[in-house]
Amino acid sequence: MRHPLTLEQLRVFVAVAERQHMTRAAEALNLAQSAASAAISGLEQRHGAKLFHRVGRGIALTEAGSLFLPEARAVLARAEAAELVLSELGGLKRGTLSVQASQTIASYWLPRYLVAFRRAHPGVEIRLAIGNTAQVAAAVHDGAAELGFVEGAVDDLTLSLAQVARDQLVIVVAPDHPWVAAKRVESRMLPKTDWVLREPGSGTRSVFEATWEGFGLRPGDLRVALELPSNEAVRAAVEAGMGATALSASVAAPSLEAGLLTQIELALPDRPFNVISRGDRYHSRAAEALLGLMGLPLRSP
């Protein structure tokens, strides 16, 4: 008789996958390394699938492990949501609210609300994950997060969407870029420089590409010299003299103030910050409380 899959095994698997190290995962879960190893071995033996490659002192996910990871995260998130529902019967005293947000929102806009929520409900933990807009939408769709915060629209009919704020994109270059000396930069000049952009799927990239077309420029005219996975990496590359980029004004502000970047006076449209959630699922009181702090209560269906 095979032993059933347990939440503890899933927690160990996710912790090991995220840290790519058995000992560090065991320490994070307050387990003995032997117990963590036994949990992984039990999973692998039960299903006849190898989840990790052993590489020197570290480990890496196999293809099977990579496929299993989002499912394991979703199950754990749903278990936490179920626990949160029960805990809320006695008020907002304990539980975990899973939230995922795009990089710009998570780094520059959301923290103030997380701090306010923590002060109001110290017993409720908020588990925040960061991804690009496409990854956040997928996490909410799959149940790995109850709330997601993204820039712009999401093409998923199962998700409800509401605006919580607005953000301004700006074009920036290094101080020695030729555009800085130009009397005026017009949209027709944009294809004449290299661009450093976020990866496809990010909200910043999507909004900028839509703006590019709005200027009457062809997508093929965009000379992308570098695609980088974080706002900070994009900003640093442009500071080092690699072309131009479009960033949130919040992201660019420290470098503009320090004189490391110069803003180009070519107006870009602002964009919404939106909250997304599954409209067909129970919305916890913790989620409602967080959104209430933002002036947008979320009613349970």
Image: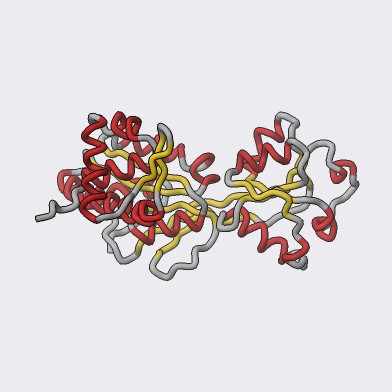
Q: Position of residue 243 (x, y in %)?
A: 77, 46
The colour mode here is: secondary structure
Q: Residue furthest bottom?
A: 157
Quarter residue 162 falls in: bottom left
Asked if residue 88 shows in the view, the reply is yes
Residue pictured at 46% horizontal, 45% vertical: 130
Along the line of sight, which residue is nearer the eye, 16 or 161? 16
Task: Decide: is 6 above or below 29.
Answer: below
Q: Is residue 254 left or right of residue 5?
A: right
Q: Tell me the quarter of the image containing the N terminus.
A: bottom left
Residue pictured at 58% horizontal, 46% vertical: 229
Q: How many marks?
A: 0
Q: Is residue 105 left or right of residue 95?
A: right
Along the line of sight, which residue is nearer the eye, 89 or 35? 35
Q: Tell me the quarter of the image containing the C terminus.
A: bottom left
Asked if residue 146 shows in the view, the reply is no
Q: Position of residue 183 (x, y in %)?
A: 90, 47
Residue pictured at 75% horizontal, 59% vertical: 222
Quarter residue 122 falls in: top left
Q: Is residue 42 left or right of residue 280?
A: left
Residue pictured at 84% horizontal, 55% vertical: 192
Q: Residue furthest left?
A: 1
Q: Position of residue 203 (x, y in %)?
A: 57, 55
Along the line of sight, which residue is nearer the eye, 184 or 200? 200
Along the line of sight, which residue is nearer the eye, 292 or 63? 63
